[in-house]
Image (cartoon, helix red, strand yellow):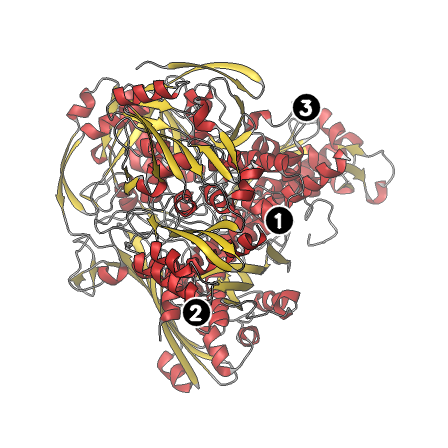
Amino acid sequence: MNDMSNKWIGARTIRPDGADKVTGRATYSADNTMPGMIWGKVLRSPHAHAVIRSIDTSKAEALPGVKAVVTAKDFVDFPIDKSVMLGIQDMRWMARNILAKEKALFHGHPVAAVAAISEEVAAEACKLIEVDYEVLPHVIEIEDAIKPDAPILHDWVRHEGKPSNIAGTMVLKAGDIEKGFAEADIVVERTFTTRPVHQGYIEPHACTVSHAADGRVTIWSSSQGQFMVRAMTSLLTGIPQSNIRAIPAEIGGGFGAKTIVYLEPVAVMLSKKSGRPVKIVMTRDEVQRATGPAPGSLMTVKIGAKKDGTLVAAQGTFYLQAGGLPGSPLRGPVGCSFAAYAIPNVLSTGYDVVSNRSKVAAYRAPGAPHGAFATESVLDEIAEKLGLDPLDMRVRNSAKPGDKAIYGATFGDVTFVETMDAIRKHPHYKAPLDKNPRPGVKRGRGVASGFWYNAGGESSVQVNITEDGNVVVTTGHPDVGGSRASIANVVAELMGIDHSRVNVIIGDTQTIGFSNLTGGSRVTFASAMVATASCEKVVGQLKERAAKIWKIDAEAVKWEDGMALPAGDNAGKFPPLSLKELAAKANEMGGPIGAQVQLNTTGADPGYATHCVDVEVDVDLGIIRVLRYTAAQDVGRALHPSYVEGQIQGGVVQGIGWALSEEYLYDKQGRVDNASFLDYRMPVCSDVPMIEAVVVEIPNSKHPQGVRGVGEAPIVPPLAAIANAVHDALGKRFYALPMSPPKVTARMDEA
Amino acid sequence: MSKMHVTTTINGEPVEFLADVSSTLLDALRGSLGLTGTKEGCGTGDCGACSVTVDGRLMCSCLMLAVEAEGKSIGTIEGMAQGDHLHPLQQKFLEMAALQCGICTPGVLISARALLEKNPDPTEEEVRFGLAGNLCRCTGYDKIVRAVLETAADMRESAR
Amino acid sequence: MTDIRYLAPNTLDEAVSAFAAASGAASILAGGTDLLVQMRAGVRKPGTIIDIKKIPALTAIEDLGGGAFRIGAAVSGAVLAEHMGFAKAWPGVLEAINLIGSKQVQGRASPGGNLCNSSPAGDSVPAMVAAGAVVTIQGPNGKREVPVEAVPAGPGRTTLAPGEIVVSFTFPVRPKGASDAYLRMIPRTEMDIAVVGLGVNLTMEGGVVKAARVGLGAVAPTVLLVEGAAKALIGSRLEDAAVEAAAAACRAACKPIDDKRGTIAYRTKVAGVLLKRVVAIAAARAGGN
């Protein structure tokens, strides 16, 4: 099936959901209403850290127009001493994140929620809720949270036997690092910091929910997984999954952060109490203050190499912010930082640090960009000190097929070198760069690489032949950026029909089988694999029908160009039967034609990316701009090249923001000081150049179309690539992100 | 609370509605008027998802009171296509995959149309600055800018 | 629930009397790009909103001849940008006004609103201070005229008396060899609030600076007229020493704060850097006039 001469696989078709999205007709989470609907509003903690002694909601409940008030007491209790996991999420923390229980753990932490006849009345009622807080000292930064005298967030957290804010540890080891470093000719050890960054989706969280009199619940919301919404809502409210229909609205960006719930269970309980459908829409301020972000980090990476550039030992220590509740993505930096390199001696340790910030959420390759910033910066420094080309040095150290990865797997194909070759051969890498184009302006070029696991997991796909002989495909995965288009290409190809005859829709939780989250670069991999299996079943049915009509063996029928043809000895004996003809005869020949396949998919090989970037620095103002960017990645197979490129381009620009301008700022009271798109500075259109995506396609042998996964890897290299380019321009290395203008000028003014 | 009566024109059609003084044009469009194609990303004029035209001029509908619409002519994304005939920008955005999640797309299209009406032959830099008020988090802007430049070229060609 | 009144008077007198009658509970609405954000945040809760855009004087652009202009306080940046004569006479003022927000915001935001919002970081204000623009103010006690720099009193505060409305800005006659420029430092290329903003207005004669004014924003509670910088420039041929002295005067004038948008050290440094860059642009423009 890895034939590259396909008609639809690899074609730049128009997405099935496109026309609705360019005309404003696509309905996103905030675009829905329900009959008799009322409005919910969340009361949030005004303190960064406080014990909640009591909550008195009586005055709010008495306000005319208020229909329901809920607090954590209205939800299923998840005692601290008993973990209940859903995927990677612990319901003890999820319950306490959607509504604070014992303590308010960050400024903006939900404490109660109101449903009323209007948003204004709901907001008014929130002010009438009396919360008795015992305000505690707060702690925001990792450096402060791990000090011995730091305010402790959770008395049940112990690290090395003592009360601590280190809520978890992850260690991966290979070989003997002492021995490794002793063998090294050069050892470089540096400490890095990155600031928390928000995923920055433009669509705020929102939902509309109905809890009907018979206990059946309908949830309309956007997320990266309607089944996640159903499962978490069920766990947190105690309503069985069979009674919760979670309908996926169009999703206005998620990037990982919409893999958990914030509003849906709260709205369900408000609806249950009030007997009315409830809609809640977050403001941007609430989104920035209380959802996401990706963690900030404090990292030390030490790498030893031989004079020829052979890496012999690596040690990484990664502290990641978890926010107010445990659960930072340690497996990102701990597992990915050194994974692409064959280093015999490695010790990689991660610490999950709680502090009085909003609970972190997944963000594209969670944790991996942090680790790559540190590791790829140190590698650049080693290459510079050894006088080696930085990519040549990486190529020399690439992991090989059959090597055991530090995270436990054994590598199958390793296509890391191919991404580096794509950059080494690209005109960008060889293009002359005037490093001093004008007085006060410096330019530089940098490279860096990245690794992401990729993922398989559960998917369900239905392929149904309509009575008029066309195809409707239903998947269980929200489409965050072109997955419907990719699946339409696969199905058109396998059914041998024109792309326009295939429609792809997203089913809700009660109409399609269980499908895991859209995340981890898994959806196109998994759903294409399952769609392929569904199409094979449907083609089998079609061949059987033709065989029946022709009264020959089904094995003697082949399917080609959307038609059944008699094959073998029967070749040419009967005129072909088209999909339309077979559909028309479906009922008389055995009933409707269609198949649903549900699989737990495996075989998603890791993703590799190598990036090259040119920057320009206004030395006096400390402003860094990206002039040119080339990103190479092995995607296995690009089912729809435009959306593959789009994933790469979008990930890179998020990386540019992370490197240069995005960060959370807190005031002295522990409140987010820049909870707006004005001061949380995501790149705007005029900040960035065209992003050239070099799509390397080495088919994944474990996937029917060769798909590898795309979405995460592009955000892994940019932080280091840009830092390395800035070093090339200025001769100074930056160990702290973002490289904002005041930091750049301060560094330049250092002796 | 007394509402004000507003008589206005939306996408060429006469419209009357009632609005609280404090509510924005965006609130009115998305609320009682049911025109949810105009999106709210921030409510503070920083993302451009709520872009509309008022008497032909590009604005954020979140930064305008609904009552200010009195006597004006409002253009929203719902009025960009003529029936099922897409505007060239809409068609090009589909062909060139200039959208991913699509939440910013209505605002980007309204901005891009305003840009091309003023400047039918923009440079890449002019497109980038012209769209700087429209945040997009998915695409990295590359395909958006290319689609606008290509549409401009097509429209110039067909205007000859 | 508070009941807000909306008024859109057609005359200045009506507006002034309504504004005065509301005794502090009213807000003037021009472009609304600050007011609506502040209302949403709950920072401002006006009882009455007085929309001044239907008053002809507030939205007029008058070419007074010889480079002099009178600009209504509620003229939006987008409208002003379409006036070719103003762009030629006052390119620095126009580029400053056109830096207030996005294209969308430009469709609404006005110099009058920018001044009355009284943020030290308002982009148009340093340029108008450098231009020597005069503000016409109408209030219950009649009309008065003051220089732009006399209006801001501190962040969010003005020297306007209760009931007073900013009507227009008058820009003086342009001698030959005069031009202006404005630059601001922002981390991104667009959509940010100025970390430092600086406007310079120069009159050149035979390569010698005959007149100069420097307006400096976002480095003190109000936008500053930096007379020391002007003094260093006047009489010079913009030799390095003179420009450096003017830059030093700008740095010395800074009384900034550390906040989310910049540090004291950074703002002070940038004030000097911008002075040099803006002087060069203004001088090049003046040479062409």
Return the residue found at the far right.
A572
Q: Which residue is mark 2?
A: A375
The front one of C82 and C45 is C82
The front one of A491 and A594 is A491
The front one of A699 and A48 is A48
Residue name at image x 19 percent, y 25 percent: A60
For disc 2, the chain is A
Position of residue B10 relative to residue A355, above or below, is above
Residue A540, percent across and down? 68, 39
Residue B76, percent across and down? 54, 27
Position of residue C1 relative to residue A17, above or below, is above
Q: Which residue is mark 3?
A: A587
Q: Which residue is mark 1?
A: B124
Three-letter amino acid code of the residue under disc 2: Thr
Report how far apart the C-alphas of labels 3 and 1 lie in the structure: 57 Å
Dividing the picture into quadrants, the one containing residue C6 is top left
For disc 1, the chain is B
Secondary structure of the residue carrying numbered label 3: loop
Residue A685, percent across and down? 53, 47
A469 vs C235, left or right, is right
Q: Is residue A13 visible?
A: no
Mark 1 and mark 2 on one chain: no
Secondary structure of the residue carrying numbered label 2: helix
Q: Indicate the quadrant containing the C terminus of chain A: top left, top right, bottom left or bottom right.
A: bottom left
Q: Is residue C97 visible?
A: yes
Callout 2 environment at 10 Å: few (<14), some (14 to 19), or many (20+)?
A: many
Q: Nearer the viewer, mark 3 or mark 1?
A: 1
Secondary structure of the residue carrying numbered label 1: helix
Three-letter amino acid code of the residue under disc 1: Glu
Residue A324, percent across and down? 26, 50
Mark 3 and mark 1 on one chain: no
First along the sequence among labels 3 and 2: 2
